[in-house]
Image: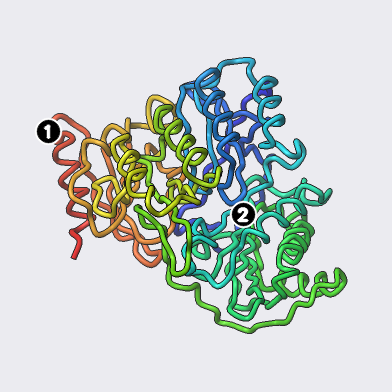
C-alpha cells in the first residue's frame, strides 16, 4: 500500500491565498485511490467520480470494497466524490485492482486530477440551457489522454454548469457555463472577463486553459488559479493565445459576468415538462451513507432507474430514469432508510467534517454534536468543523461551528464576509444543550 500522506489545509475566507498565496514548498499530498491518506481510523481512499456519475455496478463495487476493506460506509465529499475510510493496512493493491476492473480507475497516472463537478440534474428536469453530459464525457477523456494534465494538483477543479448556476459558485479553477445559443461561457478562476466558445469545443477549451495554467503555476509555485499572485487576468490572456494555436474559436466576452443565481437540487421526485422519466433526489445526513442505504440506492438505480447514480457536491444522490408511477414509492423507501427526501428535514443544510475519533487533528466529536443539535430547519445551513482547517466546508452563506481549545466558535458567513465569532465554552457549565441553542440562534428560522 502506498505510504499515507498528510494533506495541507484548505484556504479559508480572509486567508492570504485569496490575493496570492505563499510559495508551495512541498508536493501535493491530496489523497486518491492509489495514494492513500493515513487517518486515525485507518487509511482513506478518495475515488474521483467526474460529475459524481457512476453505474449501479460500479456503486456495488464501492459498497463491497467498503464492507470488505473499510468501515462499510460510503463517505460523500463536497466535490461529488466518494471516500472509503478505515481501510486495512496493505489493501492498496487489492483496492486498485478492483477499481480498475470496474472502470473507476481509467488512468492510474491521472486518477487524482479527474476533479470535475457538473450540474447533477442536467438533462433530467429541463431547467438547464444544455445537457452537460457530453462535455463531461469528453473532458474526462481529454484529461486522461493529456500528458500535461498529470501535473495538475489534486485540488484543481473544473465545473460544468448547464446554466442553472448550481456549480458555478463552487470556486472552480475553470468553469464552463452553458448559454442558450449553443455556446459556453468559459471563466478562468474569478476573472471578471471570460470567453465564449462553441459548445462543441468547450471541453477542449477547458483542458487548454488548465494546461496553460501549469506554466504560470510552475513559476509561481501554486496549485490553484486563486493562488496566482497576479490574479487570473494574465492567465486568461495567455489562454486566449493558446486557444488560437489549438484551433479553438474563443471570443472575449468582457465582464462582469455574474454567477447565475444558484438552483441547488431539492430533495424529492424530480420531473420536467415533456419528460417521460422521473428522478429521485435525496440528501445524506452528514454525507455518510450506511451500507444498507447504499445497497438500497444501488438496487433502486438498477431495478427501477436507468442503472446510474449521480453524487452531488452537496453530499446528496440523484437516481435518474424512473417511471413516474414508481417514483413516489421508491422515495418513500429511501425516506424509511433514513435519507433526506423532503425540504423540511431537520438534517437539510447540516454538514460536518469527520471529527473525532477519525481525525487526529480534530478537537471534538463534531458529528455527535451536530446530531444532538438537529432541530427545526434553520434559515442558514450549518457546518461543524473539528479544527480551524474547516475541511470540506461548503461555499456560500452559512453558520460555521469550529472546535477550539476553548470550546466551540460560532460565526456567520454572508457574502464571503465572516462576522465576529461567538465562543461557547467547552467546560462543565456549558454542555451540548447550550451549544445547540447558540447554533440554532445563529442559523435563524425559516420564513
Residue at the spot x=44%, y=55% of the render? 278
Q: Nearer the viewer, residue 256 or 79?
A: 79
Picture residue at 37% right of the left edge, 54% below the top: 269
Residue 146 drawn at (x, y percent)? 81, 51
Residue at mark 2: 157
Dot 2 surroundings within 10 Å: few (below 14), some, or many (20 or more)? many
In-image side of 395 versus 147 (left or right)? left
Q: Which part of the image, by quadrant, shows the N terminus? A: top right
Residue at image coords 63%, 68%:
231
- Residue 126 in picture, x, y percent from top left: 49, 68
**Coloring basis for residues:** rainbow
Of all residues, the one furthest to the right in this rendering is: 245
Between residue 187 and residue 128, name the one nearer to us: 128
Kindly give the residue lying farthest to the bottom in the view shown.
Answer: 254
Q: Which residue is mark 1?
A: 429
Q: Earlier in the sequence, mark 2 or mark 1?
A: 2
Residues under labels 2 and 1: Cα distance? 44 Å
Amino acid at each position: 500500500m502506498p505510504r499515507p500522506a498528510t494533506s495541507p489545509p484548505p484556504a479559508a475566507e480572509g486567508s492570504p491565498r485569496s490575493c496570492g498565496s505563499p510559495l508551495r514548498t512541498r508536493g501535493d499530498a491530496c489523497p486518491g485511490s492509489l495514494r492513500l491518506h493515513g487517518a486515525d481510523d485507518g487509511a482513506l481512499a478518495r475515488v474521483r467520480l467526474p460529475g459524481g456519475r457512476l453505474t449501479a455496478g460500479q456503486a456495488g463495487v464501492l459498497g463491497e470494497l467498503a464492507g470488505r476493506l473499510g468501515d462499510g460506509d460510503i463517505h460523500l465529499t463536497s466535490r461529488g466524490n466518494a471516500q472509503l475510510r478505515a481501510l486495512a493496512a496493505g489493501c492498496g493493491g487489492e483496492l486498485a485492482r478492483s477499481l480498475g476492473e470496474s472502470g473507476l480507475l481509467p488512468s492510474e497516472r491521472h486518477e487524482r486530477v479527474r476533479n470535475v463537478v457538473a450540474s447533477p440534474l442536467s438533462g433530467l428536469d429541463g431547467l438547464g440551457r444544455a445537457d452537460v453530459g457530453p462535455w463531461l464525457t469528453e473532458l474526462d477523456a481529454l484529461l486522461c489522454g493529456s500528458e500535461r494534465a498529470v501535473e495538475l494538483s489534486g485540488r484543481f477543479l473544473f465545473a460544468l454548469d448547464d446554466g442553472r448556476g448550481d456549480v458555478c459558485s463552487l470556486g472552480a479553477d475553470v468553469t464552463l457555463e452553458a448559454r442558450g445559443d449553443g455556446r459556453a461561457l468559459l471563466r478562468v478562476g474569478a476573472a471578471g472577463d471570460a470567453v465564449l466558445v462553441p459548445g462543441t469545443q468547450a471541453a477542449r477549451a477547458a483542458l487548454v486553459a488548465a494546461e496553460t495554467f501549469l506554466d504560470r503555476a510552475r513559476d509561481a509555485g501554486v496549485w490553484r488559479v486563486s493562488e496566482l499572485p497576479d490574479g487570473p487576468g494574465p492567465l486568461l490572456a495567455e489562454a486566449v493565445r493558446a486557444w488560437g494555436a489549438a484551433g479553438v474559436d474563443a471570443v472575449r466576452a468582457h465582464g462582469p459576468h455574474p454567477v447565475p443565481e444558484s438552483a441547488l437540487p431539492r430533495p424529492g421526485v424530480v420531473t420536467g415538462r415533456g419528460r417521460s422519466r422521473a428522478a429521485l433526489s435525496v440528501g445524506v445526513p452528514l454525507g455518510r451513507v450506511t451500507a444498507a442505504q447504499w445497497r438500497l440506492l444501488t438496487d433502486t438505480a438498477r431495478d427501477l432507474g436507468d442503472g446510474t447514480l449521480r453524487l452531488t457536491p452537496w453530499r446528496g444522490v440523484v437516481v435518474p430514469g424512473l417511471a413516474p408511477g414508481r417514483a413516489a414509492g421508491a422515495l418513500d423507501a429511501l425516506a424509511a432508510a433514513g435519507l433526506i427526501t423532503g425540504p423540511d428535514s431537520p438534517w437539510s443544510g447540516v454538514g460536518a467534517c469527520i471529527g473525532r475519533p477519525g481525525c487526529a487533528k480534530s478537537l471534538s466529536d463534531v458529528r455527535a454534536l451536530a446530531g444532538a443539535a438537529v432541530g427545526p430547519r434553520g434559515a442558514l445551513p450549518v457546518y461543524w468543523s473539528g479544527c480551524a482547517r474547516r475541511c470540506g466546508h461548503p461555499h456560500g452563506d452559512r453558520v460555521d461551528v469550529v472546535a477550539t481549545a476553548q470550546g466551540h466558535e460560532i460565526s456567520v458567513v454572508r457574502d464571503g464576509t465572516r462576522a465576529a465569532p461567538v465562543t461557547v465554552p467547552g467546560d462543565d457549565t456549558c454542555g451540548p444543550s447550550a451549544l445547540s441553542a447558540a447554533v440554532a440562534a445563529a442559523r435563524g428560522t425559516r420564513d
